[in-house]
Image: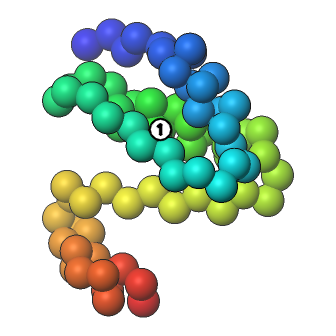
Amino acid sequence: MKLIERTQYLQRLVDVIGTPDIKVITGIRRSGKSKLLEALKFYVEKNIGGSNVIHINFNLPETEQLKTHTALYE
């Protein structure tokens, strides 16, 4: 499957980095929300020094123990 780059959506997210507002990404299933966040993660890691990005895929078996707020906090 070919990945379609959503540069316009990515740029909109980049433009609001650093604002105190909560950002919400919505869309129908399989519309590219996760890929957009992945692109944002790579942008931040590459362009913003000292960034601290944590990526957790809750669909993987090895993250099963992180599904409670207490475990995730710890």
x and y, in percent, of residue 50 in the image? 79, 59
Is 57 situated above or below 14?
below
Amino acid type for the residue under numbered disc 1: Glu
- The residue lying at 73 percent from left, 40 percent from top is 46
Position of residue 38 in the picture relative to residue 2 (left or right): right
* Residue visible at 59% across and 33% down in the picture: 13
Name of the residue lying farthest toward the front: 21
Residue closest to the eye, 7 or 12: 12
> Image quarter for residue 15?
top right
Say above or below: 73 vs 37. Answer: below
User: The C terminus is located in which quarter?
Assistant: bottom left
Residue furthest to the right: 49
Residue 22, placed above or below residue 36:
below
Which residue does the image show at 52% across and 21% down from the upper left? 9
Residue ID for mark 1: 38
> Considering depth in this image, is 31 or 27 the residue closer to the camera?
27
Residue 29 sits in quarter: top left
Which quadrant would residue 33 be assigned to in this image?
top left
Nearest the eye: 9 or 48: 9
Q: Position of residue 72 (x, y in %)?
A: 36, 80
Kindly identify the residue that appears in the image at 40 percent across and 11 percent down: 4
Color scheme of the displayed model: rainbow
Q: Residue 49 in the image: state x and y as whole percent.
A: 82, 52
